[in-house]
Amino acid sequence: MSVQKPVYGFGDLPLADVDSGTNILVTGPALGGIRTLVMRMLLCRRSDEGALFIAADTDGQKTLSDYEAAGGAVDPRRVGVVDCTEEGTADESHNVVSVGSPSDLTGVGIEFSNLYERLVAGGATNVRTGVYTLGPFVMYADAKTVYRFLHTLTGRIRTADGLGVCAIDPGTVDRQTLSSLAQAFDGRLELAREDEEIRVRTAGLADQPDGWRPIDL
Amino acid sequence: MMVGSVWLSKTTMAGVTVLCVDPDDDERVATREAFDVTETETVEAATLEAAVEALRAERVDCVVTEYHLPDGTGLDLAAELRETAPDTPLVLFTDASPSHIETGGYEDLIVEYLPKDMPESRASLVRLAGNLVEQRAQVGYPLPSDEDERLAALEQYDVSGLEAVDTFDRLTDLAARHFDVPVAFVGLVDAHEERFLACQGANWETLERENTICTHTILEDEVFVVEDTRADERFADNEELARREIRFYAGAPLRTRQGAAIGAFCLIDDEPRSFSEADRHVLEQFGDEAMEQLELRRRLADREQPTESTTGGDR
């Protein structure tokens, strides 16, 4: 079987393309630009791509408006949001579904799988998934549930040749927890901010530039 | 080629058993027939009760279930599964839309979901089930990146009669006395459970892997210490550890010469304590000794059965 598998590109971000099926853990301080970075990594670069957000910290509407501000096209056939916030509401016209609580990881998983299938069936065969952020899940669910959720999520993305980008502020979890969560990912993108300068570096991802490099967010 | 969101990568799932649960006979048979094509073994059930019985009768590799069952729901079944065989993946393959699925009380189960109304949904289902099994996608603990190789290596060392080997009893007894801890054990971490070869101070035989600290130890290069389980986010809410009064843990990974971590030599206390660098070094030596004994048993077993166990990566 000779099928050309897609790669995911990141435009002018200082990141080389990654293979399809790659899951990346993005770490950095919440106020350091990490949200913008996730939004830009989720920008569709080809007509067969889609974007799916799992929004745990901010609601679906804000997620879509931030995505649009980052340059994303909010087309409900290609973009969807699983809103996990307690105050979230569903909005069918914008493909936003609501779970009601970040503690309901079973509900999040079901809505995610359903939206993923619908996007693919609608022609967005290469889906970029963004989780912003893992923090509430880690806070509300027990560790076993979080591992199970992450394996299921990253497994689905890997199998479907998607791209997974999951963000967490390392200040919100202890070091050991972060390192065992990282086990579910192919690699890590670390963001750091010092005064006005924002830098990133990667670990575990093939063919990326070495060391810290500046990023303009 | 691609079916739904799932790439086709394998054509057979021989050796895999799937429990298919659907109250509608035609639907259930269609699902079974889709699995038949890939040589997957199937067990069928039309009700929650029959499905639970089937799970108790044999260990299956994956469960595929409708959401609405005559005597319950697919999530009731998932709850039973997480109690009895927590690593086993479950797929809701259903006509019910997510908004009709009641997750209240079941927030921590985590299942896969595939709507029946998608094009070629049964082909997607078979592929999804195969991937879930192959990737161990619903396990509740971090997995080593070399898990397949690790399990293959474990098989080489897991020779019959190991539990009867007095050496491990002596070693754990010595360790418990040396460190003044109530429990010391040698455990092998297999695909779903930890099995205790020797356990000084407690009567443990097996433990579901998601409840063990050793499944974390095998990810480490060095001795792994949890000075207080209640103060560690990874273990604070683990009820099984609380039930066994495990507050302190120190474990030295047992590594084969090729580097595969197959188990751990461990100390347990029922109250928090500290563990010095010197302690770590001594525990490491206990671990090395246990590993040497395992190596010896493997070689003996190889000699006795030269036609078997000549495969696998660890020699």
Image: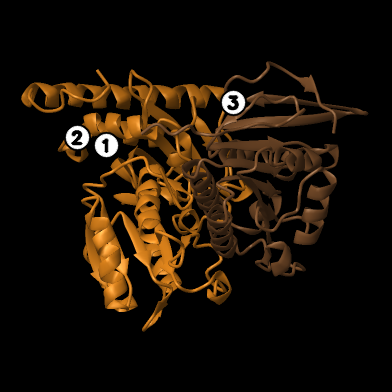
Q: Residues within 10 Å of mark 3 (few under 14, many from 20)?
A: some
Residue named by callout 2: B165
Q: CA distance from mark 2 to mark 3?
A: 45 Å
Describe the element under mark 1 as helix, strand or loop: helix
Query: Would residue B49 be visible to someone looking at this image?
Result: yes
Describe the element under mark 3 as helix, strand or loop: loop
The image quadrant that residue B178 belongs to is: top left
Amino acid at dot 2 = Val
Q: Position of residue B281 (x, y in %)?
A: 48, 21
Check contact, mark 1 vs mark 2: CB within 8 A: yes
Q: Nearer the viewer, residue B207 or A131?
A: A131
Query: Would residue B52 be visible to someone looking at this image?
Result: no
* Circles 1 and 2 on the same subunit: yes
Residue named by callout 1: B169
Name the residue located 55 percent from the left edge and 70 percent from the top edge: B98
Q: Is residue A102 left or right of residue A195?
A: left
Name the residue located 38 percent from the left edge and 43 percent from the top edge: B8
Q: CA distance from mark 1 to mark 2?
A: 7 Å
Instruction: Give the colour chain A carries in the figure.
Output: brown
Chain letter belonging to callout 2: B
Q: Is residue A75 shown above or below B305?
A: below
Residue named by callout 3: A205
Q: Position of residue A13 (x, y in %)?
A: 76, 28
Q: Residues within 10 Å of mark 1 (few under 14, many from 20)?
A: some
Amino acid at dot 3 = Leu
Instruction: Give the colour chain B carries in the figure.
Output: orange
